Image (cartoon, rainbow, N blue to C red):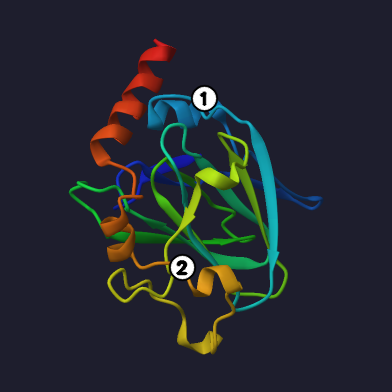
Amino acid sequence: MQIRELSVPDSYEITPKQFADDRGVFLEWYRFDKLEEAVGHPLDLRQANTSVSQRGVVRGIHYADVPPGQGKYVTVTHGAGIDFVVDIREGSPTFGQWDSVILDTVDRRAVYVAEGLGHAFIALTDDATLTYLVSDIYKPGAEHDINVLDPEIGLEFPPELGDLVLSPKDKVAPTLAQRLADGSLPSYAAVKEYYEANRKERI
């Protein structure tokens, strides 16, 4: 597999090598050793999630308190969508910036989202099925959101999708500026210390 860092530091696009024959296709969509080599520590898996979304559904922007945060390794197993990573770490040189990767069953890419980064997804097809491997269990009190339509962030969605479908909770999520003002965003310095502590534990 090929792994490249996205323009938002500490997030990565993973492109697997596919082996096709008359039976179908075989690939490795997750390799802990390859990810560890790129990231600096292995993904300590604690939970696996699946979401199924209809065309035009948007989920996000979501993030969790650090520590422990919730590192995510995501891929699409049916259909297609766009995965977004947003740097919401207060004090980061790339604060407020984002990058995206098309996830589908053609290239079968995955995205790694480090703890402290924001994550969002939009379905490009009906029944777009997103599978998440995550580094911590779901903890409602530690989970937060930012409005995915915040113009300050400016995520770009395909206009042909028409009216986007958001959950009631995501529709009223605070903006990035509001989260910055209320002090609920991860600190870049604290998050980097957390990354480094994870690396040292593995040495």
Q: Are discs 2 and 1 less than 8 Å apart at CB?
A: no
Q: Amino acid at mark 2?
A: Ala
Residue 201: give x, y in percent of width and height.
Answer: 42, 13
Q: Nearer the viewer, mark 2 or mark 1?
A: 2
What residue appears at the point 29 percent right and 53 percent down from the top-left corner? 7
Residue furthest top in the image: 203
Residue furthest front in the image: 182
Q: Earlier in the sequence, mark 2 or mark 1?
A: 1
Q: Where is mark 2, residue-wise?
A: 173
Residue 62: give x, y in percent of width and height.
Answer: 48, 56
Question: Can you say which quadrant of the picture contains the C terminus?
Answer: top left
Residue 108: give x, y in percent of width and height.
Answer: 59, 54
Q: Amino acid at mark 1?
A: Asp
Say which of 68 and 95 sits in front: 68
Q: Is residue 182 visible?
A: yes
Disc 1 is placed on an element classified as: helix
Say which of 19 and 83 sits in front: 83
Q: Is residue 58 visible?
A: no
Residue 170: give x, y in percent of width and height.
Answer: 53, 69
What residue appears at the point 36 percent right and 14 percent down from the top-left corner? 200
The residues tagged by marks 2 and 1 sit, at their Cα atoms, a distance apart of: 37 Å
Left or right of residue 82, residue 30 in this image: right
Q: How many marks?
A: 2
Disc 2 is placed on an element classified as: loop
Residue furthest right in the image: 23
At label 1, counting other C-alpha atoms closer than 10 Å, the crowd grade (few under 14, some 14-19, many 20 or more) is few
> Considering only vertical position in the picture, is 27 above or below 175?
above
> Considering only vertical position in the picture, is 95 above or below 196?
below
Left or right of residue 88, residue 125 in this image: right
Q: Where is mark 1, residue-wise?
A: 33
The quarter holding residue 197 reads top left
